[in-house]
């Protein structure tokens, strides 16, 4: 516990120093962009180290988790419960985003700042149809999927691989033991990489503040405050639903999720928090075979913060251009986002890509994305942290449903239990 508290403290220090140093550079340096670019190298290095871990960690933990279940029916049952939670949480996130943006109407204040309707946002869109989703779902090559860190494809292959291993039985045990060893090694490697997190947080925050200054926060202050308030409301709803299942143990879970949530917030990357979230859930008492199965699924199907942002931002842009969307249109948009938001993990600026595609489908000027680009990093911080909270709650609740939630292990005993 002592080490984890220290790392959390260092991350907070890095966050605060990043704001101070970035603001100083913005005011006093002739070309703050140069400083920002230099800092982005540090951030990029850290995120690449994380991405280096993700594919083998997801594959190894998921395969071992499924193989340990040993029963295809159990895999289907746990997966069904997880997907049931994901669908409910997705609908809550998307609906709350729609309610908030219609209640606050932040786009009405942006009429004077509108870019030309033919301006280019620089966000590459793709045809996010059902066909494209299905084609993207299954990898043509697992090597290619791992090379590109396509989490959804890795999850699909791992489910098939783990299920087949469980069906083979005794003959697969040597291979499963080997894969389990890989999982332990990757978790140990995660500990090494996380020591670099405070420096990466400092670099990420100082670089953004140096480049954009705190003025951009003042310009978009009301919009950001309304979005952060909406995110806070989503947290309360999800935590309340979690409390209905976990009762007083919800406090211990939130304590374990504190550090990975802060890490996701500071780096604006929920991927960066995946390894520590997995460790925290196991300390909380979630059995490895449940945590290593449900958590990777959540990273593909349960990005609550990102989904809320999609509805909030899309309607915000429509409001900015004076386009009134009927209730029926907004419900249709929500259902489309319910599908197109799946598999966003691993795609750079995925939320903006999904929003861009949605704007095109409803004849809303894509140039409206330019209203978001200046503050997208700060918005991404909130939605990344929300993704961690949502997936942590989902995994713990599914474990509770399955009767696979043990005692909360804390302190030195946790370090002995976990690799």
Image (tube, rainbow, N blue to C red):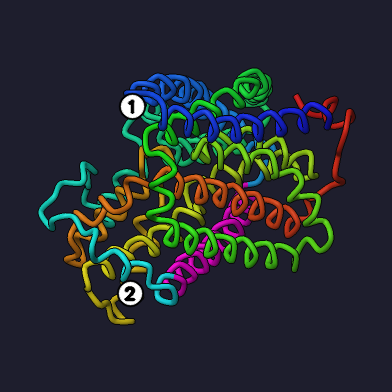
Mark 2 secondary-structure assignment:
helix
Seen at 61% across and 43% down, the residue is 293
Q: Nearer the viewer, residue 40 or 403?
A: 40
Question: Which percent across, then down, holds residue 281?
Answer: 72, 42
Question: Which percent across, then down, holds residue 339?
Answer: 37, 59
Image position of 287 (left or right of 70): right
Residue with the mark numbered 1: 33
Seen at 63% across and 55% down, the residue is 394
Q: Is residue 327 above or below residue 271?
A: below
**Quadrant placement of the N terminus:** top right
Q: Nearer the viewer, residue 322 or 400?
A: 322
Q: Residue 309: which quarter of the image?
A: bottom left
Residue with the mark numbered 2: 330
Image position of 184 (left or right of 146): right
- In primary-sequence order, the first of circles 2 and 1 is 1
Seen at 58% across and 33% down, the residue is 165
Image position of 311 (left or right of 193): left
**Quadrant placement of the C terminus:** top right
Image position of 55 (left or right of 135): right
């Amino acid at each position: 516990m002592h080490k984890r508290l220290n790392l959390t403290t260092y991350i907070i220090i890095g966050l605060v120093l990043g704001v101070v140093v970035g603001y100083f550079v913005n005011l006093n340096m002739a070309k703050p962009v140069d400083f920002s670019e230099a800092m982005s190298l540090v951030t990029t290095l850290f995120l690449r180290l994380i991405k280096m871990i993700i594919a083998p960690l997801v594959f190894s933990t998921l395969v071992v988790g499924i193989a340990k279940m040993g029963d295809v029916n159990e895999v289907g049952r746990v997966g069904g419960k997880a997907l049931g939670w994901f669908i409910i949480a997705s609908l809550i996130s998307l609906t709350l985003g729609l309610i908030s943006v219609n209640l606050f109407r932040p786009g009405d204040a942006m009429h004077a700042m509108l870019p030309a309707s033919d301006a280019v946002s620089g966000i590459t869109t793709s045809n996010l149809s059902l066909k494209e989703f299905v084609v993207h779902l299954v990898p043509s090559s697992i090597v290619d999927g791992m090379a590109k860190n396509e989490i959804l494809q890795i999850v699909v292959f791992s489910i098939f691989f783990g299920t087949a291993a469980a069906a083979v039985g005794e003959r697969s045990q040597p291979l499963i033991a080997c894969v389990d060893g890989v999982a332990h090694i990757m978790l140990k490697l995660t500990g090494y990489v996380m020591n670099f997190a405070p420096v990466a947080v400092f670099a990420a925050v100082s670089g953004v503040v140096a480049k954009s200054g705190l003025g951009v926060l003042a310009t978009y202050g009301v919009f950001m405050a309304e979005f952060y308030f909406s995110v806070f409301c989503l947290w309360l709803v999800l935590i309340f639903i979690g409390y209905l299942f976990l009762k007083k143990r919800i406090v211990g879970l939130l304590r374990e999720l504190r550090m990975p949530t802060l890490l996701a917030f500071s780096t604006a990357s929920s991927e960066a928090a995946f390894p520590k979230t997995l460790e925290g859930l196991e300390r909380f008492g979630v059995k490895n075979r449940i945590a290593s199965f449900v958590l990777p699924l959540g990273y593909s199907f349960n990005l609550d913060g990102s989904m809320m942002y999609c509805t909030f931002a899309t309607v915000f842009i429509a409001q900015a251009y004076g386009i009134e969307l009927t209730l029926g249109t907004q419900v249709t948009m929500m259902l489309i986002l319910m599908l197109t938001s799946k598999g966003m993990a691993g795609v750079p600026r995925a939320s903006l890509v999904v929003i861009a595609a949605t704007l095109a489908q409803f004849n809303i000027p894509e140039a409206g994305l330019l209203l978001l680009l200046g503050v997208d990093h700060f918005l991404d911080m909130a939605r990344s942290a929300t993704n961690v909270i949502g997936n942590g709650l989902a995994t713990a609740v599914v474990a509770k449903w399955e009767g696979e939630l043990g005692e909360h292990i804390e302190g030195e005993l946790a370090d002995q239990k976990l690799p």
